[in-house]
Image (spheres, coloured by chain):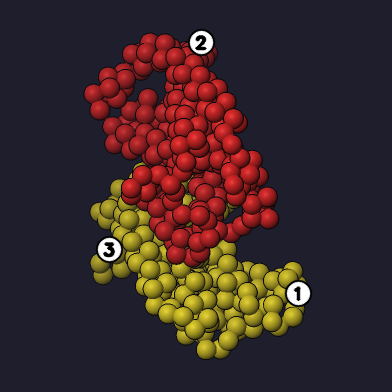
Chain colours: A red, B yellow
Amino acid sequence: MGMITALANPQRFMTVSRVAAPILAAIAVLLAVVGLWLGFSAPPDYQQGATVRIMFIHVPAAWLGMFAYACLAGSSFFGLIFRHSLADAAARAAAPLGAGFTFLALVTGSFWGRPMWGAWWVWDARLTSFLVLFLFYIGYMALQASIDDEAKAARAGAILALVGAINLPIVKYSVDWWNSLHQGESIFLKGGPALAPVYLWPLGLMAFAYTFGFLALWMTRIQAEIWRRRAGALAVQGAR
Amino acid sequence: MSGFGVLMRRELALAWGRGGGPVVAVAFYACVATLLPLAVGASPQRLAAVAPGSAWLALALASLLSLERLFERDYEDGALDLLALGPAPLEIVAVAKCLAQWISTGLPLALFTPVAATALGADPRLIPLTFASAVLGGLGFAFVGGIGAALSLGTRRGGVLIAVIVLPLFVPLVILGAGAIEALAGGLNWTPGFLLLGAYSLAFMGLGPFAMAAACRNALA
């Protein structure tokens, strides 16, 4: 919490993120290289064969798709309550990243589903709620893009993001109620993970790689957003 | 007469007034229901299998139609500014608007839903539940849709934007409403779906007005 309030000062954020973003990106690349190497050298699964390797790309993408929404909703909350411009920029910057991760999870999931389930797409609970999450990101971005006034766009987006934060868990549970054919939870189980360590290690490394990568991209996008606003303000000043 | 009553009367008069809003919504519903057999084939078995679900899908789409005018009309002619300055808080204005939307569009559509479902080949046993779930779901469609309508005030391409914002929010309503009918058709217990549908609609009836009022204030600022 203390770190977030310290970073809430835009000037300080710019100074810190200029150093932090490349470092986070470097850590992400390093972790991804090791994670992918371990992932590709892991033995094929006795049931899934080589397609088990898709998991190292797919599962962290799905986690980050949800994590990005949490970041989006959290930033929106701060932006709405405290009218903080950096929080608005953070929310706006998180949305395309979240949409990207969600899309990656959907596409890689479908690549995995083709050999495993014999279909590119099944209307199972988890796939469907993920598709809804993706559509939600699209709606959020469409709303922001169609309002010219930046402050108004930010507030309208924040309201929608918070409505979504209430609604998305309900979507998740209603879709679960509707149908479930996807395999159950296999990592965060009582009594330790059901996944063999040879798969767990690359998965964990990739999860951290994705998280650091997301943070680096997010910071860079917030920076870009602040630069864009300054450029706009300067253009207005110059036109006077 | 209380302020809320005046607001309701005004909204209902506007909805039923010029343009025949509810009639257009029901006509749209009839068009979608007509296209369905043309698209999937007219064989009775196939149609009967998808009839309750398609009736719900058409209901969700038809509920979108009049949302665009819900706040936009008052925003354009300045009435929303006056309502914001008036004694009733904007939250209450939003409740009045959505309730009027439910009464003027949701109820006619709910009356028509069992007709369409039965015409498509659904079992006549399902008629009472189809009607009841469409009434309850219509309440949710009005209050969830109102959020999208308020958020897209003053934006370019309002109508399509509302659809893109609101349809993902409609997911639980469609699942629960169609699911309850599907359960009854399959001889299962339909009450959980129906009760959850009611819970969702009532929850958004409580929460939605705050989001709508915040969105209106933002657009007016």
Chain hosting mark 2: A
Residue indicated by mark 1: B41
Q: Say if labels 1 and 3 share a chain.
A: yes
Numbered circle sitting on residue A102: none
Q: Nearer the viewer, mark 2 or mark 1?
A: 1
Residue tagged 2 = A238
Q: Amino acid at mark 2?
A: Gly
Could you tell me residue B57's position as x and y percent?
A: 58, 67
Q: Disc 1 or disc 3, which is closer to the eye?
A: 1
Q: Is residue A41 left or right of residue A200?
A: right
Residue at image location 25% in from the left, 28% down from the top: A1
Which mark is first along the chain, 3 or 1? 3
The residue tagged with tag 3: helix, strand or loop? helix
CA–CA distance in space, label 1 to label 3: 52 Å
User: Circle 1 marks a residue in which chain?
Assistant: B
Picture quadrant where residue B9 is located: bottom left
Picture coordinates of residue B219, whole percent (x, y):
42, 42
Q: Disc 2 versus disc 3: distance between alpha carbons?
A: 50 Å
Q: State how far apart marks 2 and 1 are (Cα).
A: 64 Å
**Which residue position holds label 3?**
B3
Residue B177 image offset from top left, x and y in percent: 47, 71
Q: Mark 3, chain letter?
A: B
**Marks 1 & 3, CB-CB < 8 Å contact:** no
Using a 10 Å C-alpha cutoff, classify the residue at mark 2 as few (fewer than 14 neighbours), some (14 to 19) or many (20 or more).
few
Q: Residues within 10 Å of mark 3 (few under 14, many from 20)?
A: few
Residue A107 drawn at (x, y percent)? 62, 43
User: Decide: marks 2, 3 in contact (CB < 8 A)?
Assistant: no
Closer to the camera in the image, B214 or A176: A176
On screen, residue B9 versus residue B110, left or right, reads: left
